[in-house]
Amino acid sequence: MADTDAALKTPTDLSRNDTKTVADALNGILADSYALYLKTKNFHWHVSGPHFRDYHLMLDDQATQILATTDAIAERVRKTGNTTLRSIGDIARRQTIKDNDAEFVSPDKMLAELREDNLALVELLREAKDIVDEAKDNATSGILDDWTDQAEERAWFLFEASRKG
């Protein structure tokens, strides 16, 4: 077991205690990113109503953007000498964004739920920013700014799309 652990210890100049804290924060964000991705795709597949085309396309764009962050998140964890998620079960144990398995969700409720989930992700990203800044992990800090901006933009689009009148 020790040989396997050593084989995955990527060299880093960051303190091991700090990188473990960074990895824990990023793995939580990664789990929530996968949960949010799947929920966004679920709603993309099941949206209905008079704004179907607009919502369908917007949700697909947002899901694509969320999925694009997952590899970068996992690679940041690995670059700090830690390991990342390994399975759907691992995601389920770590995610804080709740699944939605309802047979029908109205478009308004879809947009509101995704907006709140994106804002919850923003909160996690801001908390992680404090952790990585404390660890002096400048590379992760800069990327977190981009991911925060993307999640804020998604929340904004979902808000604007849900407005009446």
Image (cartoon, rainbow, N blue to C red):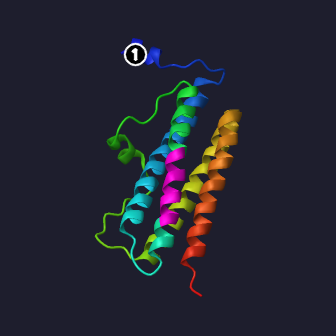
**Residue count near mark 1 (Cα–Cα under 10 Å), binned few <14, some 14–19, many ≥20:** few
Residue at image x 35%, y 38%?
87
Image location of residue 124, percent across then percent down: 57, 51
Residue 111 is at least partly visible in this image: no
Query: Which residue, as the protein is rendered here, is positioned at the far left?
Result: 103
List the residue tagged with mark 1: 4
Q: Is residue 125 magenta?
A: no
Query: Which residue, as the protein is rendered here, is positioned at the far bottom?
Result: 165
Q: How many numbered marks have been drawn onto this rendered protein structure?
A: 1
- Residue type at mark 1 is Thr
Looking at the rendering, which quadrant does residue 139 occupy?
top right
Q: Main secondary structure of the magenta part?
A: helix
Residue at image x 53%, y 28%?
78
Residue 149 lies, with reference to residue 27, above or below; the image says: below
Q: Which region shows up in magenta? A: 57-68
Residue at image x 58%, y 62%?
154
In this orientation, which residue lies closer to the viewer: 3 or 37? 37
In this orientation, which residue lies closer to the viewer: 53 or 47? 53
Looking at the rendering, which quadrant does residue 123 occupy?
bottom right
Relative side of 138 to 75, left or right: right
Residue at image x 49%, y 65%?
57
Image location of residue 80, percent across then percent down: 58, 27
Query: Which residue, as the protein is rendered here, is positioned at the far top?
Result: 3
